[in-house]
Amino acid sequence: MNSISFCIASAKNEKYYTLDVLKSLEDNTEFTNHEVLIFIDSDNQNTYEALLDYRQGKPNIKIYRNTLGFPVGSQRNVSIMFAQATKDVVIYLQSDMVVCPNFDKYFIEALDNNTKRVVSAARIEPPIHPASPEKIVKDFGLTPKEFKYEEFISFTKELQAENRPLMEGHFAPFGTYKQTYFEYMGGFDTQFRCSREDSDFIIRLKATGLDTVQTWNACVYHYTCVSSRGTGWYKKDEEAEIKNQWQTKADQEELKRFIRKWGYFGHEYKTKYNTTLVLDINTAPDLNILSYIEPYFDKIVLNEQPVVTQLASLVKYNSHYFANKRWNYSPEYWEEVKSEFMGPDLLDKFVYSTNYQEKDDVIVTTDYYSLSKNINDSTVRSFIENTNATFFSLLMNSNDYKGTYKIKCFNIKVNNLVDINLYHLDNTQYLFNTDKYIFS
């Protein structure tokens, strides 16, 4: 069997989850044939000391402990672990997962020596998660303490006996050839700090021509999103509600970030065109309306400097405040490390001008009074949220697409239609220096 580098991310409150995923690997794989890298991103349970004890007599286990006081985050630590892996095949596991019998055998079988394939392991999850076609909802417990290990083993053996065919799809846990990960993907987009990085990854996986499949025979039990939401997020108490409110606000900002990048939200590659909104502030503006339309345009030109300043400040505040609270980043620490995270400088997209004359690819012009009066009109909303689909249709249906158009309150000047989403497929931009992270 091919040797595998299993890469496990661990964080605070995850000591016993991490020990359980290791036990399942030891029980259910040719453990000594493989390498195990563990990235302890944060720790409040002496996880590091427990793992030092656990790995005695197990030279295939390597550990990195983050001592910065602030989490690195999974968007980076996956690439860090993969970069430090010494085996050709790498698999990313979250600590809140337990692997099934012969996990390594069935995973390698699904990979099938295909260097253009990325394999996901099927998830079995408790009923606090919604049902969907790519996973099984079945309750084997919500914590390691109550986990029904033998029942899980018995169930997964029955599942393997069904020998379900591979299906298309991608989700964590996943694995591929180390060389494939870096040469095609480069890594995750680190501007997505709380969510949506997986959706971004899926678009790029498909667009670069990689084969994304899920195997049912190599499956995991996934507890409760401990890695992303923390422990007890599903409980109906004040602590969980407060935690989820922070996460919800952070998720909303990640969705805006995604739309700024790709022009929409989804998992299929679509074209995006460089579009400028020129807005005449001719009556009292509502920043909530401006905040709603902002992610859908690459540049926003306003003829009132105070509005430019206020809108830019609000967008910048929302963009990072909630993510920093989610990861407990102090303002001072964020200023110190923000250059290590991807993403454009949002202040650059807001421009003050009373007579805008630039010849951008697409220029959409309107005035604030007309926009606010029509903001709930379905055609207006559809154009704002689907501008790129509109222009793609124009490009497909006419060789002579350049010119002026009008949709409700919008006057549109099309000078050029060049797909700027192609830039996001360049793997090199997602690479970063991982040499300072030493596993021992």
Image (cartoon, helix red, strand yellow):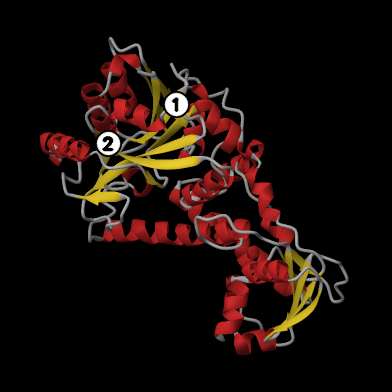
Quarter-of-image position of residue 313: bottom right
Residue 343 x/y as whole percent: 63, 49
**Which numbered disc covers residue 113?**
1
- On screen, 113 above or below 53? below
Image coordinates of residue 233 in percent, x first then y, are 29, 53
Horizontal side, residue 254 vs residue 363: left or right:
left
Residue at figure coordinates x 15%, y 40% from the top left = 155
Where on the picture, by quarter, is residue 339? Answer: top right
| Depth order, front residue of 211/419 | 211
Please indicate, yes or no, whether residue 280 appears anywhere in the rendered image.
Answer: no
**Please, what is the three-letter code of the amino acid marked with disc 1?**
Asn
Residue where numbered disc 2 is placed: 217
Above or below, 347 against 145 in this view is below
Name the image quarter holding the N terminus: top left
Question: Disc 2 marks which amino acid?
Answer: Asn
Residue 366 seen: yes
Q: Nearer the viewer, mark 2 or mark 1?
A: 1
